[in-house]
Image (tube, rainbow, N blue to C red):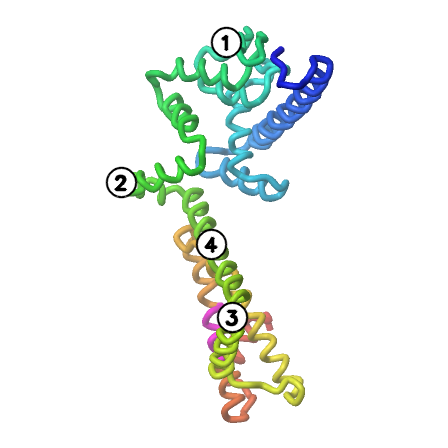
Protein backbone atom coordinates (compact mmCIF):
# COMPACT_ATOMS: atom_id res chain seq x y z
CA UNK A 1 0.00 0.00 0.00
CA UNK A 2 1.34 3.44 -0.96
CA UNK A 3 1.63 5.81 2.01
CA UNK A 4 1.32 9.61 2.01
CA UNK A 5 4.38 11.58 3.03
CA UNK A 6 4.76 11.76 6.79
CA UNK A 7 2.52 8.77 7.61
CA UNK A 8 3.52 5.39 8.93
CA UNK A 9 1.83 2.21 7.82
CA UNK A 10 0.35 1.81 11.31
CA UNK A 11 -1.21 5.28 11.05
CA UNK A 12 -2.48 5.05 7.49
CA UNK A 13 -3.97 1.55 7.30
CA UNK A 14 -6.74 2.15 9.90
CA UNK A 15 -7.80 5.29 8.03
CA UNK A 16 -8.05 3.38 4.76
CA UNK A 17 -9.95 0.50 6.40
CA UNK A 18 -12.48 2.91 7.91
CA UNK A 19 -12.89 4.75 4.60
CA UNK A 20 -13.46 1.52 2.68
CA UNK A 21 -16.02 0.44 5.26
CA UNK A 22 -17.91 3.72 4.83
CA UNK A 23 -17.81 3.43 1.03
CA UNK A 24 -19.16 -0.10 1.31
CA UNK A 25 -22.05 1.17 3.43
CA UNK A 26 -22.74 3.99 0.97
CA UNK A 27 -22.68 1.57 -1.98
CA UNK A 28 -25.15 -0.68 -0.19
CA UNK A 29 -27.53 2.24 0.28
CA UNK A 30 -27.18 3.34 -3.36
CA UNK A 31 -28.05 -0.13 -4.62
CA UNK A 32 -30.86 -0.43 -2.04
CA UNK A 33 -32.47 2.78 -3.31
CA UNK A 34 -32.22 1.56 -6.91
CA UNK A 35 -33.76 -1.76 -5.91
CA UNK A 36 -36.53 0.13 -4.11
CA UNK A 37 -37.61 1.74 -7.39
CA UNK A 38 -37.41 -1.61 -9.22
CA UNK A 39 -39.62 -3.22 -6.56
CA UNK A 40 -42.06 -0.30 -6.66
CA UNK A 41 -42.56 -0.82 -10.41
CA UNK A 42 -43.25 -4.57 -10.18
CA UNK A 43 -46.75 -5.44 -11.46
CA UNK A 44 -47.33 -1.84 -12.56
CA UNK A 45 -47.45 -0.51 -16.14
CA UNK A 46 -44.49 1.35 -17.59
CA UNK A 47 -43.55 2.84 -20.92
CA UNK A 48 -45.98 5.78 -20.97
CA UNK A 49 -44.42 8.03 -18.36
CA UNK A 50 -45.16 5.79 -15.38
CA UNK A 51 -41.48 5.28 -14.48
CA UNK A 52 -40.81 9.03 -14.58
CA UNK A 53 -43.85 9.68 -12.40
CA UNK A 54 -42.78 7.09 -9.81
CA UNK A 55 -39.24 8.49 -9.76
CA UNK A 56 -40.39 12.10 -9.45
CA UNK A 57 -42.86 11.44 -6.63
CA UNK A 58 -40.64 9.04 -4.72
CA UNK A 59 -37.61 11.34 -4.96
CA UNK A 60 -39.65 14.29 -3.69
CA UNK A 61 -41.22 12.33 -0.85
CA UNK A 62 -38.01 10.72 0.46
CA UNK A 63 -35.86 13.83 -0.02
CA UNK A 64 -33.43 12.99 -2.82
CA UNK A 65 -32.60 14.54 -6.19
CA UNK A 66 -34.67 12.82 -8.88
CA UNK A 67 -31.69 12.57 -11.24
CA UNK A 68 -29.69 10.80 -8.54
CA UNK A 69 -32.51 8.37 -7.81
CA UNK A 70 -32.94 7.66 -11.53
CA UNK A 71 -29.25 6.82 -11.80
CA UNK A 72 -29.47 4.44 -8.82
CA UNK A 73 -32.46 2.76 -10.50
CA UNK A 74 -30.71 2.42 -13.86
CA UNK A 75 -27.49 1.03 -12.38
CA UNK A 76 -29.36 -1.43 -10.15
CA UNK A 77 -31.16 -2.63 -13.27
CA UNK A 78 -27.83 -3.30 -15.00
CA UNK A 79 -26.51 -5.26 -12.02
CA UNK A 80 -28.79 -8.01 -10.70
CA UNK A 81 -28.10 -8.61 -7.03
CA UNK A 82 -26.32 -11.92 -7.63
CA UNK A 83 -23.90 -10.27 -10.09
CA UNK A 84 -22.77 -7.48 -7.78
CA UNK A 85 -19.65 -7.55 -5.64
CA UNK A 86 -20.14 -6.27 -2.12
CA UNK A 87 -16.44 -5.43 -1.80
CA UNK A 88 -16.47 -3.28 -4.96
CA UNK A 89 -17.89 0.22 -4.68
CA UNK A 90 -21.07 1.36 -6.44
CA UNK A 91 -19.10 3.86 -8.55
CA UNK A 92 -17.15 1.03 -10.17
CA UNK A 93 -20.41 -0.80 -10.89
CA UNK A 94 -21.74 2.41 -12.46
CA UNK A 95 -18.64 2.83 -14.64
CA UNK A 96 -18.89 -0.76 -15.90
CA UNK A 97 -22.70 -0.80 -16.10
CA UNK A 98 -22.91 -0.83 -19.91
CA UNK A 99 -19.86 -2.95 -20.67
CA UNK A 100 -21.20 -6.15 -22.20
CA UNK A 101 -18.73 -8.46 -20.43
CA UNK A 102 -19.11 -6.72 -17.04
CA UNK A 103 -20.29 -9.79 -15.14
CA UNK A 104 -17.08 -11.63 -16.07
CA UNK A 105 -14.76 -8.64 -15.77
CA UNK A 106 -15.78 -7.70 -12.25
CA UNK A 107 -14.82 -11.12 -10.87
CA UNK A 108 -11.10 -10.42 -11.29
CA UNK A 109 -9.36 -7.53 -9.50
CA UNK A 110 -7.08 -5.44 -11.75
CA UNK A 111 -3.75 -4.09 -10.52
CA UNK A 112 -4.00 -0.55 -9.18
CA UNK A 113 -0.65 1.23 -9.73
CA UNK A 114 -1.50 3.97 -7.21
CA UNK A 115 -2.17 1.80 -4.16
CA UNK A 116 -0.03 -1.04 -5.58
CA UNK A 117 -2.81 -3.50 -4.79
CA UNK A 118 -5.00 -5.80 -6.85
CA UNK A 119 -8.39 -4.15 -6.41
CA UNK A 120 -11.10 -2.40 -8.40
CA UNK A 121 -10.94 1.41 -8.44
CA UNK A 122 -12.89 3.93 -10.51
CA UNK A 123 -9.72 4.72 -12.47
CA UNK A 124 -9.19 1.10 -13.45
CA UNK A 125 -12.89 0.70 -14.26
CA UNK A 126 -12.75 3.74 -16.54
CA UNK A 127 -9.78 2.26 -18.39
CA UNK A 128 -11.75 -0.94 -19.01
CA UNK A 129 -14.89 0.96 -20.03
CA UNK A 130 -13.01 3.26 -22.40
CA UNK A 131 -11.43 0.28 -24.12
CA UNK A 132 -14.83 -1.39 -24.39
CA UNK A 133 -16.45 1.69 -25.91
CA UNK A 134 -13.78 2.73 -28.40
CA UNK A 135 -16.39 1.89 -31.04
CA UNK A 136 -19.87 1.86 -29.43
CA UNK A 137 -22.07 -0.70 -31.12
CA UNK A 138 -25.52 0.26 -29.82
CA UNK A 139 -27.54 3.08 -28.27
CA UNK A 140 -26.84 2.07 -24.66
CA UNK A 141 -23.09 2.04 -25.25
CA UNK A 142 -23.20 5.40 -27.02
CA UNK A 143 -25.18 6.98 -24.18
CA UNK A 144 -22.94 5.41 -21.54
CA UNK A 145 -19.84 6.79 -23.21
CA UNK A 146 -21.44 10.23 -23.55
CA UNK A 147 -22.35 10.31 -19.85
CA UNK A 148 -18.76 9.56 -18.90
CA UNK A 149 -17.33 12.16 -21.25
CA UNK A 150 -19.80 14.81 -19.99
CA UNK A 151 -19.18 14.16 -16.32
CA UNK A 152 -18.82 17.86 -15.39
CA UNK A 153 -21.94 20.07 -15.26
CA UNK A 154 -20.13 22.80 -17.20
CA UNK A 155 -19.31 20.51 -20.14
CA UNK A 156 -22.78 18.97 -20.14
CA UNK A 157 -24.45 22.41 -20.17
CA UNK A 158 -22.34 23.56 -23.14
CA UNK A 159 -23.24 20.46 -25.16
CA UNK A 160 -26.94 20.74 -24.31
CA UNK A 161 -27.00 24.37 -25.48
CA UNK A 162 -25.30 23.37 -28.71
CA UNK A 163 -27.65 20.43 -29.28
CA UNK A 164 -30.71 22.63 -28.77
CA UNK A 165 -29.75 24.59 -31.88
CA UNK A 166 -30.79 21.51 -33.86
CA UNK A 167 -34.54 21.70 -34.67
CA UNK A 168 -35.13 17.95 -34.45
CA UNK A 169 -33.43 17.76 -31.05
CA UNK A 170 -35.57 20.63 -29.74
CA UNK A 171 -38.69 18.93 -31.05
CA UNK A 172 -37.84 15.63 -29.35
CA UNK A 173 -37.01 17.33 -26.05
CA UNK A 174 -40.25 19.35 -25.82
CA UNK A 175 -42.27 16.29 -26.85
CA UNK A 176 -41.14 14.56 -23.65
CA UNK A 177 -43.29 15.53 -20.65
CA UNK A 178 -40.55 14.92 -18.08
CA UNK A 179 -38.11 17.07 -20.08
CA UNK A 180 -40.68 19.89 -20.25
CA UNK A 181 -41.22 19.70 -16.50
CA UNK A 182 -37.48 19.85 -15.83
CA UNK A 183 -37.05 22.85 -18.15
CA UNK A 184 -39.91 24.68 -16.44
CA UNK A 185 -38.48 23.93 -13.01
CA UNK A 186 -35.06 25.17 -14.12
CA UNK A 187 -36.57 28.37 -15.52
CA UNK A 188 -38.57 28.96 -12.34
CA UNK A 189 -35.48 28.37 -10.17
CA UNK A 190 -33.47 30.71 -12.39
CA UNK A 191 -35.90 33.62 -12.00
CA UNK A 192 -36.18 32.97 -8.27
CA UNK A 193 -32.41 33.33 -8.08
CA UNK A 194 -32.57 36.53 -10.16
CA UNK A 195 -35.21 37.93 -7.77
CA UNK A 196 -33.04 37.09 -4.76
CA UNK A 197 -30.06 38.82 -6.34
CA UNK A 198 -32.12 41.93 -7.11
CA UNK A 199 -33.40 42.02 -3.54
CA UNK A 200 -29.86 41.63 -2.22
CA UNK A 201 -28.65 44.49 -4.43
CA UNK A 202 -31.52 46.66 -3.23
CA UNK A 203 -30.55 46.03 0.39
CA UNK A 204 -26.99 47.13 -0.38
CA UNK A 205 -28.07 50.22 -2.35
CA UNK A 206 -27.21 53.68 -0.94
CA UNK A 207 -29.77 55.24 1.37
CA UNK A 208 -30.78 57.92 -1.15
CA UNK A 209 -31.54 55.25 -3.79
CA UNK A 210 -33.67 53.34 -1.30
CA UNK A 211 -35.50 56.57 -0.44
CA UNK A 212 -36.29 57.15 -4.13
CA UNK A 213 -37.65 53.61 -4.46
CA UNK A 214 -39.78 54.05 -1.37
CA UNK A 215 -41.11 57.40 -2.64
CA UNK A 216 -42.02 55.88 -6.00
CA UNK A 217 -43.80 52.99 -4.28
CA UNK A 218 -45.77 55.40 -2.10
CA UNK A 219 -46.83 57.40 -5.16
CA UNK A 220 -47.91 54.25 -6.99
CA UNK A 221 -50.00 52.82 -4.13
CA UNK A 222 -52.62 54.94 -2.34
CA UNK A 223 -51.66 55.41 1.29
CA UNK A 224 -53.80 53.67 3.90
CA UNK A 225 -53.73 54.58 7.56
CA UNK A 226 -53.81 51.16 9.15
CA UNK A 227 -54.43 52.78 12.51
CA UNK A 228 -57.64 54.49 11.36
CA UNK A 229 -58.82 52.13 8.60
CA UNK A 230 -61.96 50.06 9.32
CA UNK A 231 -61.41 46.40 10.13
CA UNK A 232 -63.22 45.22 6.97
CA UNK A 233 -60.86 47.30 4.78
CA UNK A 234 -57.80 45.85 6.49
CA UNK A 235 -59.18 42.35 6.02
CA UNK A 236 -59.95 43.10 2.36
CA UNK A 237 -56.45 44.44 1.66
CA UNK A 238 -54.91 41.47 3.50
CA UNK A 239 -56.96 39.07 1.37
CA UNK A 240 -55.76 40.78 -1.81
CA UNK A 241 -52.14 40.63 -0.66
CA UNK A 242 -52.41 36.92 0.10
CA UNK A 243 -54.10 36.34 -3.27
CA UNK A 244 -51.37 38.22 -5.16
CA UNK A 245 -48.54 36.36 -3.41
CA UNK A 246 -50.15 32.96 -3.99
CA UNK A 247 -50.67 33.59 -7.69
CA UNK A 248 -47.10 34.84 -8.13
CA UNK A 249 -45.85 31.57 -6.68
CA UNK A 250 -48.21 29.22 -8.50
CA UNK A 251 -48.53 30.67 -12.03
CA UNK A 252 -44.87 30.10 -13.04
CA UNK A 253 -45.40 26.38 -12.34
CA UNK A 254 -48.24 26.09 -14.89
CA UNK A 255 -47.58 23.82 -17.88
CA UNK A 256 -50.80 24.09 -19.87
CA UNK A 257 -49.71 21.80 -22.70
CA UNK A 258 -49.88 18.85 -20.29
CA UNK A 259 -53.46 19.53 -19.13
CA UNK A 260 -56.60 18.05 -20.64
CA UNK A 261 -59.55 20.21 -21.64
CA UNK A 262 -61.53 19.42 -18.47
CA UNK A 263 -58.65 20.63 -16.30
CA UNK A 264 -58.30 23.85 -18.28
CA UNK A 265 -62.06 24.44 -18.18
CA UNK A 266 -62.10 24.05 -14.39
CA UNK A 267 -59.36 26.68 -13.99
CA UNK A 268 -60.95 29.12 -16.44
CA UNK A 269 -64.30 28.77 -14.68
CA UNK A 270 -62.64 29.86 -11.44
CA UNK A 271 -60.95 32.77 -13.24
CA UNK A 272 -64.41 33.86 -14.39
CA UNK A 273 -65.74 33.65 -10.84
CA UNK A 274 -62.79 35.65 -9.54
CA UNK A 275 -63.42 38.41 -12.10
CA UNK A 276 -67.08 38.64 -11.10
CA UNK A 277 -66.17 38.84 -7.42
CA UNK A 278 -63.62 41.59 -8.15
CA UNK A 279 -66.26 43.52 -10.12
CA UNK A 280 -68.60 43.20 -7.14
CA UNK A 281 -65.88 44.51 -4.82
CA UNK A 282 -65.16 47.44 -7.13
CA UNK A 283 -68.86 48.29 -7.31
CA UNK A 284 -69.21 48.15 -3.54
CA UNK A 285 -66.25 50.49 -3.01
CA UNK A 286 -67.20 53.01 -5.73
CA UNK A 287 -71.00 53.07 -5.33
CA UNK A 288 -71.58 51.81 -1.81
CA UNK A 289 -73.91 49.08 -3.07
CA UNK A 290 -72.99 45.71 -1.56
CA UNK A 291 -75.83 43.62 -3.02
CA UNK A 292 -74.70 41.16 -5.69
CA UNK A 293 -76.33 40.79 -9.06
CA UNK A 294 -78.36 37.70 -9.99
CA UNK A 295 -75.63 36.16 -12.15
CA UNK A 296 -73.09 36.27 -9.35
CA UNK A 297 -75.60 35.03 -6.79
CA UNK A 298 -76.46 32.11 -9.04
CA UNK A 299 -72.75 31.36 -9.58
CA UNK A 300 -72.03 31.29 -5.86
CA UNK A 301 -75.09 29.16 -5.16
CA UNK A 302 -73.80 26.61 -7.67
CA UNK A 303 -70.42 26.72 -5.94
CA UNK A 304 -72.03 25.99 -2.56
CA UNK A 305 -74.12 23.21 -4.03
CA UNK A 306 -77.39 24.83 -2.93
- On the image, the x and y values in percent for residue 241 come to 56, 73
Is residue 274 in the magenta section? Answer: yes
Q: How far apart in space, not on screen, are marks 4 and 3 (Cα)? A: 29 Å
Contact between labelled residues 1 and 3, with CB atoms less than 8 Å apart: no
Residue at image mark 2: 166
Mark 2 residue crowding within 10 angstroms, few (<14) / some (14–19) / many (20+)? few
- On the image, the x and y values in percent for residue 97 come to 48, 20
Mark 4 residue crowding within 10 angstroms, few (<14) / some (14–19) / many (20+)? some
- Does dot 2 land on a helix, a strand or a loop? loop
- On the image, the x and y values in percent for residue 36 come to 61, 30
Q: Nearer the viewer, mark 4 or mark 3?
A: 3
Q: Earlier in the sequence, mark 3 or mark 1?
A: 1
Residue at image mark 4: 188
- Residue 105 tag number: 1
- Residue found at x 53% / y 7%: 111
Left or right? Give the position of 101 relative to 136.
right
270 vs 9: above or below: below
In this orientation, does residue 45 appear? yes
Residue at image mark 3: 206
182 vs 136: above or below: below
Mark 1 residue crowding within 10 angstroms, few (<14) / some (14–19) / many (20+)? some
Contact between labelled residues 3 and 2, with CB atoms less than 8 Å apart: no
Amino acid sequence: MTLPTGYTKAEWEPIVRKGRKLIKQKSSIQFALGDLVIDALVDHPRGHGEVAEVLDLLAHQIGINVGTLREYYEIAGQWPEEKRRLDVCWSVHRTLAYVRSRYVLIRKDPYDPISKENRWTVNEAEKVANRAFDTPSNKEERLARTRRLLHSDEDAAEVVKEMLTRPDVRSRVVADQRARNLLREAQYEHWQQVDREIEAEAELAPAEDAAEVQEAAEEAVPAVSYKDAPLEILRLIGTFASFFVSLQRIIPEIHAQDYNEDTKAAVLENVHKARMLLDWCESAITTGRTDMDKALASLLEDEDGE
